[in-house]
C-alpha cells in the first residue's frame, strides 16, 4: 500500500536538504511498504507554501507529494504556493498543472475542482 508520511526525523530532513534550504523545513516521504518511492521538501512562509525540492519514481507519485505539501500548508493557513522551478521535476509538474501561472499560485488552482 502506498503511503505518504511526514518526515519527523531531523537527520533525514538534513540528509535530503544537503544544506541547500533555510527555515523550518518540512517534508514528506512516499513508500510502498518498505520500498522508497520519493520525497518532497517544503516550508510555509506566512500564506505561501514553498515547495523546495521533490523527487519521485513516477509522475503520478510526484503529483501526490506536491499536492500533499500544498494541502499541509493550506491546513496551516497558506492560500497559495510556489515551486522551485530549478528542480527539473518541479518545473515539469508546473508545466503540466499550472502552465503560465505567476507565482505564488492560488491553492484553488489545483484544488478548486474538488468537492
Image: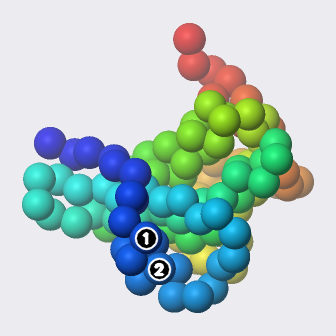
Of helix, strand and loop, which one carries label 1? helix
* Quadrant of the image containing the N terminus: top left
Locate residue 66 relative to residue 47 in the image: left or right: left
**Does residue 71 lie above or below 29 as drawn?**
above
Which residue position holds label 1? 10
Quarter of image, res 9: bottom left
Q: Residues within 10 Å of mark 2 (few under 14, many from 20)?
A: few
Residue at 37% x, 74% y: name it. Answer: 12
Across and down, in percent, residue 91 comes to: 65, 68
**Does residue 58 lie above or below 71 as drawn?**
below
Q: How is the image coloured?
A: rainbow
Of helix, strand and loop, which one carries label 2? helix
Locate residue 24 relative to residue 80 in the image: left or right: left
**Hey, which residue is sitting farthest bottom in the picture?**
19
Residue at 61% x, 77% y: name it. Answer: 87
Across and down, in percent, residue 8 comes to: 39, 58
Question: Which of the numbered marks, if any, corresponds to residue 14?
Answer: 2
Amino acid at each position: 500500500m502506498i503511503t505518504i508520511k511526514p518526515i519527523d526525523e531531523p537527520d533525514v530532513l538534513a540528509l535530503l536538504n544537503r544544506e541547500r534550504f533555510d527555515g523550518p523545513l518540512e517534508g514528506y516521504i512516499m513508500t510502498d511498504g518498505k520500498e522508497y518511492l520519493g520525497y518532497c521538501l517544503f516550508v510555509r512562509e506566512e500564506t505561501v507554501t514553498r515547495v523546495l525540492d521533490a523527487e519521485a519514481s513516477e509522475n503520478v507519485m510526484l503529483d501526490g507529494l506536491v499536492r500533499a505539501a500544498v494541502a499541509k500548508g493550506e491546513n496551516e493557513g497558506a492560500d497559495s504556493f510556489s515551486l522551485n522551478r530549478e528542480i527539473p521535476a518541479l518545473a515539469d509538474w508546473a508545466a503540466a498543472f499550472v502552465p503560465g501561472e505567476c507565482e505564488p499560485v492560488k491553492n484553488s488552482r489545483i484544488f478548486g475542482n474538488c468537492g
